[in-house]
Image (spheres, rainbow, N blue to C red):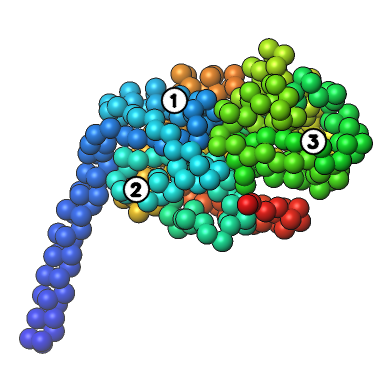
Amino acid sequence: MIQTTRRKLLIASVGSAAAGIGVPLAARAQGAAQGWPKGPVRIVVPNVPGGALDILARLLESELSATWKQPIVVEFKPGAGTLTGTDLVAKSAPDGHTLGILAIGVLAIQPALRKDMPFDTLRDLSGTMLVVGNILMSASPKLPASNLAELVAYGKANKGKLSYATAGAGSSMHLAGEQLNLLTGIEMLHIPYKGAGGAYGDVFDGRVDLLIDPLFSSMPHVKSGRLKPIAIMGLARDPSAPQIQAAGEIYPDFDFASNLGLGLPRATPPEIIAKINADVNKAIRSEALAPRLKEMGLTVTGSTPEQFDAHMRKSLKSFAEIVRAAKVTVN
């Protein structure tokens, strides 16, 4: 009886102690998010200024700086098809003060192309889906082709002479071009740039024949006459430019799009990740940003970190299959 009573008292005291420990731990966890950010927040753009990733970062900067009441610094770290800047984010201090715009297609494609990936997306990064937009293939005004059928005919008559530019090797734009090569046999040469900003001038002047880039980045130049639209590189026409044919109208299952997200180190405290995710989802749906994004032909997606992970797992598998079929390599 005495031993049983002592055992009950011991269990009760241990339980009370555990409960007492749990409260301050929970309070500290909640406080981690409440005390964030403690200073300026950096958004890394893994491309040169002037492209789609830059535009998105600056839109987020204007909205989130008001929400977080801290300066937001946009920093450009181009290289290796966006991997250089994304690697910087993945290996930064896990305190929520370094974020990065993610070219999600690149993160899904590169592991199938490289054995020397500097990071593992699912292991090292937590993310939020932001927007998805159609991809446009456009041409120099000097190219004697004004639609996809004419381009394929010209390419077959001049096999191996066509070239196309993208913002970097191993991107969804790169794979869209290689998939078109695979389906048509026209053997376009891929010219990768460190961000699309430098590619536009070369296509305007005809030094490179074609450009594959997000629709919203290319359309101002289509409207000005410096580029000719060839095709939306997806299943259906874009509502913002219904006059431009979709590749999927000729080649079923041709489905490429530009998915962009925001990432940070996975080791960041989950309470901070949750706060950033909630604030970013609110920002892209705000009255200030949502209409701007729609005007640019971007569809707001948003996501939880768990949905981001699920999308990445699915994309890693599907793009690996395309890389094998098209025999894509990166030098």
* Badge 3 density bin: few <14, some 14–19, many ≥20, Cα 10 Å: some
Q: CA distance from mark 1 to mark 3?
A: 35 Å
Residue 271 left/right relative to 101: left
- Place of residue 138 in the rendered image (x, y in percent of width and height, measured from the top left): 73, 27
In the rendered image, the vertical position of residue 144 relative to residue 43, given as above or below: above
- Place of residue 175 in the rendered image (x, y in percent of width and height, measured from the top left): 69, 45
Asked whether the viewer can see residue 327, the reply is yes
Mark toward the viewer: 1 or 3: 3
Give the amino acid type for the residue marked by disc 2 in the picture.
Ser
Earlier residue among tags 2 and 1: 1
Which quadrant would residue 149 be assigned to in this image? top right
Residue 144 left/right relative to 13: right
Viewer-nearest residue: 231 or 128: 231
Helix or strand or loop: what does disc 1 sit on? Answer: helix
Residue denoted by label 2: 92
Give the amino acid type for the residue marked by disc 3 in the picture.
Leu
Q: CA distance from mark 2 to mark 3?
A: 41 Å
Viewer-nearest residue: 202 or 91: 202
Q: Residue at x 68, y 12 (%)?
A: 224
Q: Quadrant of the N terminus?
A: bottom left
* Badge 1 density bin: few <14, some 14–19, many ≥20, Cα 10 Å: some
Q: Residue at x 60, y 40 (%)?
A: 168
- Place of residue 220 in the rendered image (x, y in percent of width and height, measured from the top left): 64, 17
Q: CA distance from mark 2 to mark 1?
A: 21 Å
The answer to whether marks 2 and 3 mark residues whose Cβ atoms lie closer than 8 Å is no
Helix or strand or loop: what does disc 3 sit on? Answer: loop
Give the amino acid type for the residue marked by disc 1 in the picture.
Arg
Q: Any mark on residue 162, and which? A: 3
Earlier residue among tags 2 and 3: 2
Residue denoted by label 1: 58
Farthest top residue?
224
Earlier residue among tags 1 and 3: 1
